[in-house]
Amino acid sequence: MTAVSVSGVTQVFNRGRPDEVTALSDVDLTVAAGEFVSLIGPSGCGKSTLLRLIADLLAPTTGTVEVSGKPARQARLEQAYGIAFQQAGLFEWRTVQRNVELPLELRGQSKAERRERAAEMLELVGLADFAGHYPAQLSGGMQQRVAIARALAVHPPLLLMDEPFGALDEMTRERLQTELLAICAQTGTSTVFVTHSIPEAVFLSDRVVVMSPRPGRITGTVGIDLPARDEAVRQSPDFFSHVTLVRKTLRGTP
Ligand SMILES: Nc1ncnc2c1ncn2[C@@H]1O[C@H](COP(=O)(O)OP(=O)(O)OP(=O)(O)O)[C@@H](O)[C@H]1O
C-alpha cells in the first residue's frame, strides 16, 4: 500500500503577476506504508509547500496528490493524516487532555471514547501525569509531545511534520527523535518529515529526499541503512558516512 503518491506536481504562486514564483517543478514522490521519509533542502526550496500539498492545504497548479490511494482532498476530509508543525499550535485555554481530544471531537466521538483515546496517546508520549495541565505550564518539548499526541489521536496512517523539533534544544530534540521513532514503530504510521538538520534526517529516516531551490525540484534520494536507531548509532562511522552522503547530495557533488 502506498501512503503518499505525488506525481508530476508543479506549484506556481501568484500566477501571471510580476511576483510569480514557481515553488515546485515536476515533483514525483512516493512514500510506502510505514516508511519514514525526510525532506531536506535550502530555505525556500519548497519543502513546506510540498507538505501542504500532501495535506491538501494547497491545491497543485498541475499534477496529482494521493494519500492512501485517495485524492488528497478526500484523505483530508477523512482525517487520514495528522499534522505537527514547528509551533506546537496548542489551544492555551484547553488542558493537555482536551487539546488531544480536539480531533476526536471533530469526528463526533463520545466523551468516554475521547477520554480513553487521549489517555492512551498521552501515555504513549510520556505525559500521562500532565493531562490536567495547561500548555503554558509545560516546557517547549512537552508541548511538542502534546502536539504529536494530538496528531496521532485519530490513529492516522500518515503523519506530516514540518520542523516539529526546530525550536528545541539539542538534547530535547534528540530525545523526541527517539520517542517519535518508537511511536511510529508501535503504530505503523508513515511519516513525511521536513527538517533543516542533516543528522536529524539521517537518524529518523528510511529515505532522505533532497531538494534544490528555484524552482524546487527533487535532486536526489539517499536511502538510510543503519543497523539500529539508538544513541550509540549517532556516534558510529556508518552514521557519519550517511551524513556526508546527504551533504554531498545537497551540494550536488557526488
Ligand atoms: N502562499 C504563498 N504565496 C506566494 N509564494 C509562496 C507562498 N508560499 C510559499 N511561497 C514561495 O514558495 C517558495 C517555497 O516556499 P516554502 O515555504 O515551501 O519553502 P521551504 O523549503 O519550506 O523554506 P524554509 O526552509 O525556509 O521553511 C518560496 O520562494 C516562497 O516564497
Image: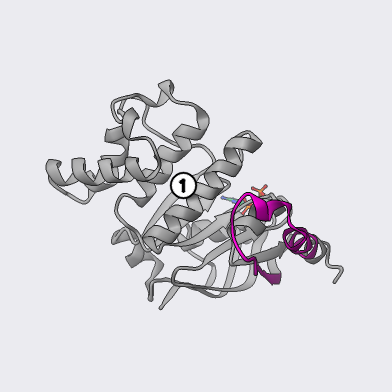
- Residue drawn at (41%, 21%), measured in percent from left and top? 137
Vertical relation: 69 (above or below) 12: below
- Outermost residue to the right: 253
- Residue drawn at (62%, 66%), measured in percent from left and top? 227
Left/right of residue 76 with respect to residue 196 in the rendered view: left
Numbered disc total = 1
Q: Nearer the viewer, residue 250 or 172?
A: 172
- Residue drawn at (66%, 52%), measured in percent from left and top? 232
Q: Secondary structure at mark 1?
A: strand
Q: At which x and y percent is residue 109?
A: 16, 49
Q: Nearer the viewer, residue 108 or 254?
A: 254
Q: Nearer the viewer, residue 14 or 22?
A: 22
Q: Is residue 46 visible?
A: no
Left/right of residue 148 with respect to residue 214 in the rendered view: left
Q: Which residues are magenta?
A: 220-246
Q: At which x and y percent is residue 19?
A: 68, 52
Q: Is residue 72 visible?
A: yes
Residue identified by numbered label 1: 84
Quarter of image, res 209: bottom right
- 227 part of magenta stretch: yes
Q: At which x and y percent is residue 118?
A: 27, 42
Q: At which x and y percent is residue 149?
A: 37, 44
Quadrant (top left, top right, bottom left, bottom right) of the N terminus: bottom left
Vertical relation: 218 (above or below) 98: below
- 70 part of magenta stretch: no
Quadrant (top left, top right, bottom left, bottom right) of the C terminus: bottom right
Quarter of image, res 249: bottom right
Query: Pointer 1: residues within 10 angstroms few (<14), some, or many (20+)?
Result: many
Quarter of image, res 62: bottom right
